[in-house]
Image (tube, rainbow, N blue to C red):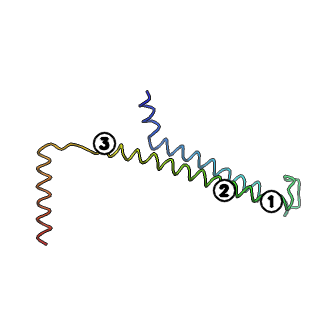
Amino acid sequence: MLNEFKKFAMRGNVIDLAVGVIIGGAFGKIVSSLVADVIMPIIAMLVGRVSVADLAYRSIKYGVFLQSIIDFLIIAFSIFMFIKFLSRFKKKEEEVKVEVKMDRQEELLAEIRDLLKAEKDSSR
């Protein structure tokens, strides 16, 4: 059961979906902050209604917006490093699978191919 879970968790689709959800959530924070802390206060000033969120000129919270962007970048970088770390193990597993033993006939054919190629290259 543990091996089945490992195969399930390491499939590309599951990891891609998890990355998408995490990045989407972090990006959602940026959009929410942009709307709530930057755009809505400007709209409130232009319309003249402070009651939108009781926001005034000094209530434009661009620092909160910048913090959301920094959070997003940190989360995205962390996910990138994690995926890079996982892909290293995935490549090692693929390399192990690629190692296929050739039988004697295949080895001889490969040697003949290499000799013919070397002869062709030396005749140039």
Q: Nearer the viewer, residue 67 or 7?
A: 67
Horizontal and vertical percent position of residue 53: 84, 52
**Image disc number at residue 97:** 3
Q: Say which quadrant the N terminus sits in.
A: top left
Between marks 2 and 1, how big is the CA–CA gap? 16 Å
Horizontal and vertical percent position of residue 111: 12, 54
Between marks 3 and 2, how big is the CA–CA gap? 41 Å
Judged from the image, the secondary structure of the residue bearing numbered disc 3 is helix
Q: In this rendering, would 30 be left or right of 39?
A: left
Q: Mark 1 highlights which residue?
A: 60
- Asked where in the image residue 18 lies, by quadrant, the reply is top right
Q: Amino acid at mark 1?
A: Ile
Judged from the image, the secondary structure of the residue bearing numbered disc 2 is helix
Q: Eyeballing the image, is 40 above or below 15?
A: below
Judged from the image, the secondary structure of the residue bearing numbered disc 1 is loop
Q: In this rendering, would 66 be left or right of 123?
A: right
Q: Nearer the viewer, residue 54 or 84?
A: 84
Between marks 3 and 1, how big is the CA–CA gap? 57 Å
Q: Nearer the viewer, residue 47 or 26?
A: 26
Q: Amino acid at mark 2?
A: Ile
Q: Say which quadrant the C terminus sits in.
A: bottom left
